[in-house]
Amino acid sequence: MVSTSFFTALDRIFFLLRDWLVGFLPVALRPAAGVLLGVIAIVAVFPGFFALTTVFERKGLGRMQNRLGPNRVGPFGFFQPVADGIKALTKEDVVPYRSDRIVHFLAPLVLVVTVFLGFAVLPMGRNMVLADMDAGLLFFFAMGAATELSIFMAGWSSHNKYSLLGAMRGIAQMISYEVVLLLSAVSVVMIGGSLSLSKIVEAQNSYSGVFPHWYIFTPWGFAGFVVFAIAATAETNRSPFDLPEGESELVAGYHTEYSGFKFALFFLGEYLAMFSISGLGTTLFLGGWSAPLSFFDFVPSWIWFFGKVMLSIFVFIWMRGTLPRLRQDQLMNFAWKFVLPFTLLNLFVTALWRFLGEGWLRWAVCSAILVAAWALMGRVGMRRKHFGPRSYRYAE
Amino acid sequence: MLGEGILKGMAETAKNFFGSYVSKERLTTVEYPEERVPAAENARAFPFLVYDGPDWQAGLRCVSCQICEKECPPKCILIEKSKDKKPDYVGKPQFYPVRFDIDLSVCMSCQICVEVCPFDAIKMNTEFALATDDRFGGLLFSREKLAKSNEYYHSIHPTEAAEVDARLAEEKAKVEAKAKAAAEAAAAKAAVSASPAEGGN
Ligand code: SF4
Ligand code: SF4
């Protein structure tokens, strides 16, 4: 069985690589060096992804708008990120005179560091998780919440009205959607019975026939995934929820006063947050690193994980190319009047699913409740107010 | 149902995304330095001097009357009149400019010089990409740089150039007819004055 062992080796390639590199060191240092290598790999790979994503995003967006997109730097414009990076590095770093210099300096660092910490608990392949915590999900959300801090640090310390407005919008939006994000993940915890992300993937990594037991293929899982995707888009400030940095009204929102490499760090942090939240969505609903059909099991697990993340990124870009930006009140209405009640209902449906037992009944009941709720709440909660022509009392 | 519109929109952008790879009509981008949209016939950027025939120095239509120099609102034309004369398109001896400079950094493309020129010697060019790294000398265009052939004029403003050519040809024909008539009259006179002598022979 040469081929099986070959694929197993491919599946474990990062471990083999690590062990080979660590083998050069004295035994006492090996565990620490192994962890360090894992950290370095994450810190190196995801910014690389970031560079690739920026160019693919710009090209894809262009195509969606029937444009060409960047095509000047290198073949097909693929060296665009290099040019952008050099530009960001060589730009003057302007700090506003009346800003709070220390906080202004720390904000991008806090953002990037907290986002990177989120990656520590994501299982990126079979056994490929840097810190397999029992409460990994909790850790991830804690780190996600910490990014809000950095956004407000940036907005407050810049001493600029646009920054502050952008930061306040960002906080309002992120807190509103954080609730939804957490609650949609709770249904997964209810079924999976664990806060450990590796256990959650393990629970989905089984097959009936050739089809996997991913949570997205259940009524509550599908509803949860849709809500999770909405909340994740809002959490990462991506279009159509990109109000905190709405160019047309706020220049650039909370990073208006950042230039050069600090701006690049914000940009990096934003994309990394997108990757990590896609990774989390993949882990919770799309079966993490497990193969989509049982006979594809031989393909290395990390390929599935990164493939699914890439697919989610494409959907992010696709939405950005399609939807216009929401207004602040629409955003809040949507969060509190539609998404949140729907998520709460989804929790109830999840419990029903759990206690109705196997069989078609739970499929019918759960799907019916969710579809009806979606239609009804969409109709009632999202009803437009018709103000009609304005009437004046005194000025007629 | 909520979200229907979003799905419709996403289908539309997906159609654009894949369509732009297969159908060329979707991509309307003109990649500027390599590709260009030909300038519209009525486009105008900066003036140039028209010459007839192959040699620009001999063929310049400008007779150095300096009307344009005086009329140019920002005063960006500088003309130096010649001491000698050379024949113009009808053969009449005329002055010509030994120096004709236009400072394009000052010119405001108003076309007044074109409108006042009685000799159809100065016209508007459509070339707009004149960027240079020499901000003084690079935009001070002398005779050599301003001179463009009549064929070039035809290529950028065909209708207008045809009108001008017709007008000039008409004038030329008139002058020639006059000259011919004068020559014939002179010949007749000569014949008349010559015949008595013949008869007397
Ligand atoms: S276009 Fe106007 S400004 Fe330019 S040279 Fe002619 S008269 Fe002067
Ligand atoms: S361009 Fe025309 S108006 Fe100007 S000097 Fe020459 S002939 Fe006269």
Image (spheres, coloured by chain):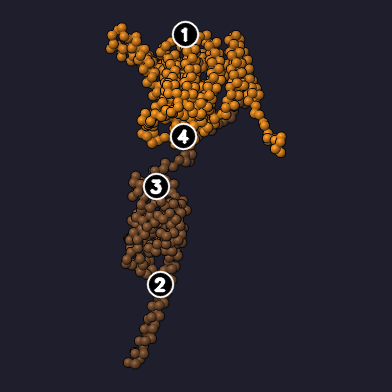
Chain colours: A orange, B brown
Label total for image: 4
Q: Chain of mark 1?
A: A
Closest to the observer: A67 or B174?
Answer: B174
Q: CA distance from mark 4 to mark 1?
A: 43 Å
**Residue B44 location in percent, x, y?**
45, 52
* Amino acid marked by disc 4: Gly
Q: CA distance from mark 1 to mark 2?
A: 106 Å
Cβ atoms at labels 1 and 2 below 8 Å apart: no
Write down the residue under mark 2. Answer: B176
**Residue A105 location in percent, x, y?**
42, 23
Task: Point out the tag, 4 or 1, that comes first from the N-terminus.
Answer: 4
**Residue A366 location in percent, x, y?**
61, 15
User: Eyeballing the image, is B184 above or below A1?
Assistant: below
The quadrant in which residue B186 appears is bottom left
Cβ atoms at labels 4 and 3 below 8 Å apart: no
Pointers 4 and 3 within a single chain: no
* Amino acid marked by disc 1: Asp
Which mark is in front, 3 or 1? 3
Write down the residue under mark 3. Answer: B129
Write down the residue under mark 1. Answer: A134
The quadrant in which residue B191 appears is bottom left
Q: Chain of mark 4?
A: A
Q: Which labelled disc corresponds to residue A62?
A: 4
**Residue A82 location in percent, x, y?**
36, 30
In this rendering, does residue B31 appear at all?
Answer: yes
Q: Chain of mark 2?
A: B
Closest to the observer: A226 or A33?
Answer: A33
On screen, residue A342 versus residue A164, left or right, reads: right
Quarter the N terminus of chain A occupies: top left
